[in-house]
Image: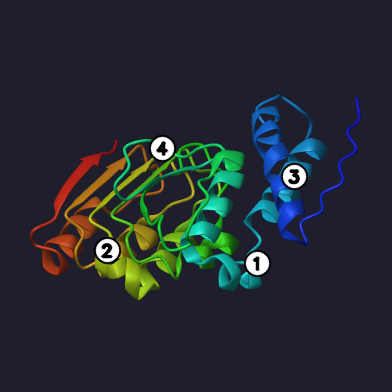
Amino acid sequence: MGITCSVIIDCPHQKMLFGKISRKFYILKKLPWSCDYRAFWGWLNAVFNKVDYERIKDVGPDRAASEWLLRCGAMVRYHGQERWQKDYNNLPTGPLDKYKIQAIDATGSCIMSIGFDHMEGLQHVEKIKLCECHYIEDDCLERLSQFENLRKSILEMEIISCGNVTDRGIIALHHLRNLKYLLLSDLPGLKEKEKIVQAFQVALPSLKLKLELK
């Protein structure tokens, strides 16, 4: 069995075509293929995460980040809306400053560190859920914690079954100075639980830290 794939992402209308096939690729990834196919998906996921800085300038950080997240299989919810956006081709149109990302659910997505520059300009994100994100690692959490806008806006985080996350990445989250709730569940890379608890007690004494770790 062989697959031939041509991916073109240089202009906006081509990005729409790219987004249209991304969900199909995301579903196909679950098939039990060989190492060669896993290498192919690794390459394709890197393409999905590539940052187009001109696109961010043209459409604004919230729209560009929405496109990135949905390409990678995540979902977003905007301020003033209850419905989650999960279809790339059904992203809302209208004034670029109208739709501000309030929540991100990256469950099972392929977001990775090379795409995190999409988050730098986001100013209204209050909740992020990272669940079964195989490409999420310490560098991702450290990068996220460096963005001043997110340091101020994020109130809740859930990190679940992300096997590449270690103590270093979790402790970096203490820079999210308005964080009120943090759930850590099924994270085998965490080895120093007491150190983590102590770090958050000192930096964020009002934080509700929930640990579901072995």
Residue denoted by label 3: 17
Q: Bin the neighbour count of mark 4 within 10 Å (Cα to Cα): few under 14, some 14-19, many 20 and up.
A: few
Image coords of residue 149 (percent x, y): 33, 71
Residue 153 disc label: 2
Which badge, 1 or 4, comes first in the chain's sequence? 1
Which badge, 3 or 1, comes first in the chain's sequence? 3
Q: Quadrant of residue 22?
A: top right
The answer to whether residue 72 of the structure is visible from this angle is: no
Which badge, 2 or 3, comes first in the chain's sequence? 3
As drawn, 57 above or below 110: below
Closer to viewer: mark 3 or mark 1: 3
As drawn, 54 above or below 92: below
Residue denoted by label 1: 52
Q: Give the CA separation, mark 4 to mark 2.
A: 19 Å
Q: Bin the neighbour count of mark 2 within 10 Å (Cα to Cα): few under 14, some 14-19, many 20 and up.
A: some
Name the residue: 57% across, 73% down.
57
Q: Give the CA separation, mark 2 to mark 3.
A: 33 Å
Disc 4 element: loop
Q: Give the CA separation, mark 1 to mark 4.
A: 24 Å
As drawn, 118 above or below 79: below
Residue denoted by label 4: 84
* Residue farthest toward the left in the current orientation of the protein: 206
Looking at the picture, which amino acid does disc 4 mark? Trp
